[in-house]
Amino acid sequence: MGHRLPNHNGLCKNVHGHGYEAHVILDGHVDATGMVMDYFDLKTMVQPIIDELDHCFMVDESDVVMKEFFASHPMKVVELNAPTTAENIASYLVKRISTQFPENHNVTRLTVRVFETEKTYAETTKQLTIRN
Ligand SMILES: [Zn+2]
């Protein structure tokens, strides 16, 4: 995914990209099936969101330079209402994923960890209320 941080004082103000990796971590109660949540169900929730981001350019909605460029050069773009840092991407994913849980679930906490490189990541956690 491509991005840039237009107000950054270093190289990150330039257009560049990362082979991002996102870890989705669930805490919760193990039910009679022996699981907090079936991996298949989690993947069904998360994969469409990842597909939206794969090979897109994530643009900060206040970045008028890039928004003008994409207005005349249509490409796969996802807009964020904040700088496209790993922290804000993790928050974006937590918000998106937390709305996807089914009516009944056993999850008490959702954490998303976004790696920009093998060693550097940011994570966001949201407490959830069990519904079953
Ligand atoms: Zn970057």
Image (cartoon, rainbow, N blue to C red):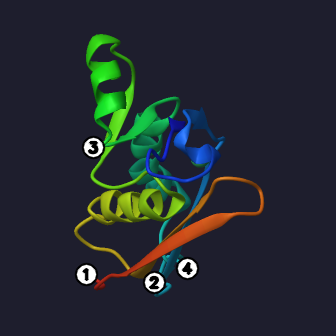
What's the amino acid at mark 3?
Glu
Please state the horizontal and vertical placement of residue 116, each as a whole percent of the image.
64, 53
The residue lying toward the viewer, choosing from 85 and 55, is: 85
Question: Of 20 and 39, which appears nearest the observer?
Answer: 20
Select label 3 or label 1 by which is in front: 3
Residues packed near mark 3 inside 10 Å, few (<14), some (14 to 19) or many (20 plus): some
Answer with left or right where residue 33 lies relative to residue 77. Answer: right
> Residue farthest to the front?
9
Q: Is mark 2 within 8 Å of ligand 1?
A: no
Q: Amino acid at mark 2?
A: Asp
The image shows residue 23 at horizontal and vertical percentages of: 59, 62
Residue identifier under label 2: 31
Q: Residue at x 32, y 82 (%)?
A: 128
Q: Do callouts 2 and 4 mark residues in contact (Cβ within 8 Å)?
A: yes
Q: Is residue 30 above or below residue 89?
A: below
Label 3–label 1 contact, CB within 8 A? no
